[in-house]
Image (tube, helix red, strand yellow):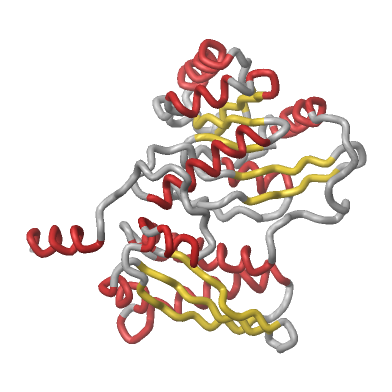
Amino acid sequence: MALVGRPNAGKSTLLNALVGEKLSIVTARAQTTRERVLGILTTDRSQVVFVDTPGLLEPKYRLQQAMLETALAAVADSDLVLLLLDGTRPDELPDATAIEALQRRAATLLVAVNKVDEAKPNAVATLKEWSRQQLGVTARECSAQTGVGLAELQVELESRLPVSPFFYPADDLAVQSVRFFVGELVRETVFEQYSEEVPYATVVRVDEFREERDPLYIRAAIYVERDSQKPIILGRGGSAIRALGQAARMKIEDFLGRSVYLDLWVKAMPGWRNKASALQFLGYPVPKADGVQGTSEKQRSRKRSKND
């Protein structure tokens, strides 16, 4: 089942709530999820493989183009699709391309208005009417944060699943590797501790993972887009990266259930969000469509110099 929606609609929070484990990172900032995260919910009668996707957005550079293609591919490939609408932001709706993709899945599409604990009643009503008119689907109401409506939503989606043998063992919760989740927890902490554009210009790659050592040794590289961003990540005298490492290590230890030695390095990879070769090196899909050229690093440097 593909979980789709605009950035910050609550898809990752919903996945974590339904699976009962923190698999997708969650922050107050939009566009935190960059890749598909597969979470597994197994009960005595069904197994649901949720596909948490990046937000349906208008791409500004190649990474965002790849993120959009990932989300639309999940809409096309999954058995069921759940569109999550943000009840607190009734004006933020899928664009025409996304609506067309969702309309093609009308027979297997569910819609839910999320954050009803915070939303105004007229906003929820507006979104439910939009769902009826645009998609021909009666939207449910839920709150991934408080759990309101989740039991009913789970019953409905289970009833809509195709009959099939389970794809995964009953005790599996996720498909991605432990390394993937470790990198995501470090990246989540970057989003929490740094401001403005820095988190979006950051990517984490786990280079070493030694399980035989006690504590477990993890070496991860934090890549930024410009050399000028390295001192921001490091902080004065290394204070910022020490705080980052401490907070991330506590999350990783809680996730793994054992002691961890986290060794963080900061490196610059100029313009990585808009370079196909850099995306491939970092493990992101290279977008098939190349309509988003973005702004080259040289152009951005000239613009910064002019502004200075």
Residue at (52% x, 50% y) in the render: 33
| Number of residue marks | 0
Quadrant of image for the N terminus: top right
Residue at (84% x, 46% y) in the render: 167
Q: Quadrant of residue 161?
A: top right
Quadrant of image for the C terminus: bottom left
Q: Which of 214 and 51 is in front in this view?
A: 51
Q: Answer with left or right where residue 23 lies relative to residue 231.
A: right
Q: Quadrant of residue 70?
A: top right
Q: In this view, does 282 lie above or below 33?
A: below
Q: Quadrant of residue 107?
A: top right
Residue at (20% x, 63% y) in the render: 298
Please state the horizontal and vertical placement of residue 287, each as a whole percent of the image.
46, 48
Instruction: Return the residue found at the far bottom.
Output: 213
Residue at (61% x, 27% y) in the render: 112
Q: Answer with left or right where residue 56 lies relative to residue 53.
A: left
Please state the horizontal and vertical placement of residue 113, each as a whole percent of the image.
57, 27
Q: Nearer the viewer, residue 169 or 113?
A: 169
Q: Is residue 95 above or below residue 181?
A: above
Q: Answer with left or right where residue 181 lies relative to residue 233.
A: right
Please state the horizontal and vertical placement of residue 131, each as a whole percent of the image.
54, 17
